[in-house]
Image (cartoon, rainbow, N blue to C red):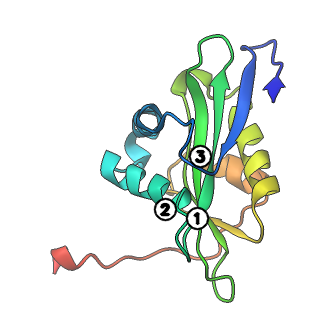
Amino acid sequence: MILKNNKTEDYSIKTVRKSENFNREVFVDFLYKSLEEYGDDRNSIEESIDYALSDSSGKGGFIVCIKSVKTGKFLAGAVINRTGMKEYIPENILVYIAVDRHFRGKGLGKILLKKIISLCEGNIALHVEYDNPAKFLYKKMGFKSKYAEMRLEKKDL
C-alpha cells in the first residue's frame, strides 16, 4: 500500500510474515541505529526477527515496516512476537518499534502502531523505558501502564 504524505514523502507499508523477499540485514541495521539508547545489540534484534518469522510450533509473529517510495530506505519498523500465553499474559509482545530520527514527529509511529493493532489477534504488551518520549504516543494509542517490570540478572549475583 502506498500512502501519500505531502509533508514528508510518499511511503509504503508492508507486513512481513516470512523471510522471503525481505532484506533482513538492512532491517536489523535500521532497528539497531534507530532504537538508539533504547535498543539492544544486533544479535538480540536478529533473534526477535527469527522468532517472529518462525514456522515452529509456539513461535511466530510478524514485522511491519514503512519504506520511502523514493529511496527504498526504511523509515519505521517493528517486530511483534506471539507469546503463546494468552491465558495469563498478552498474546503479542511488541518487541521493537522504531522510527528513523529524521522522520520522527511526522505521524509514522502512529501509522505503524495502528497497523500493528489491526494485525494482532488479542492483546499487546510492550516494554518502554520511563524516560522514552515514545511513551506518550503509546498512552495516546490506548496502552496503559499496568506493572513496573523488575528483572534479576543472574550474572550480577
Q: Which residue is mark 1?
A: 60
The first of marks 3 and 1 along the sequence is: 1
User: Vertical placement of 63 versus 73: above or below?
Assistant: below
Tell me if residue 55 comes above or below residue 72 in the rendering. below
Q: CA distance from mark 1 to mark 2?
A: 6 Å
Q: Residue at x 27, y 75 (%)?
A: 153
Q: Quadrant of the N terminus?
A: top right
The residue lying toward the viewer, choosing from 21 and 3, is 21
* Disc 2 versus disc 3: nearer the observer: 2
Where disc 3 sits, the SS reads strand
Q: Amino acid at mark 1?
A: Gly
Q: Residue at x 66, y 32 (%)?
A: 66
Secondary structure beneath dot 2 equals helix
The amino acid type found where label 2 is placed reads Tyr
Instruction: Name which residue lies at 45% across and 56% down.
Output: 50
Mark 1 touching mark 2, by CB under 8 A?
yes
Q: Are discs 3 and 1 less than 8 Å apart at CB?
A: no
The circle drawn on residue 78 is 3
- What's the residue type where badge 3 is placed? Ala
Crowding at mark 1 (Cα within 10 Å: few <14, some 14-19, many 20+) = many
The Cα atoms of the two marked residues, 3 and 1, are separated by 14 Å
Q: Secondary structure at mark 1?
A: loop
Mark 2 → mark 3, Cα distance in angstroms: 13 Å
Residue 43 image offset from top left, x and y in percent: 31, 51
**Mark 1 vs mark 2: which is more N-terminal?**
2
**Which residue has dot 2 on it?**
51
Taking the spot 77% from the left edge, 51% from the top edge, the residue there is: 140
Quadrant of residue 106 within the rendered picture:
top right
Q: Position of residue 151 (x, y in %)?
A: 37, 76
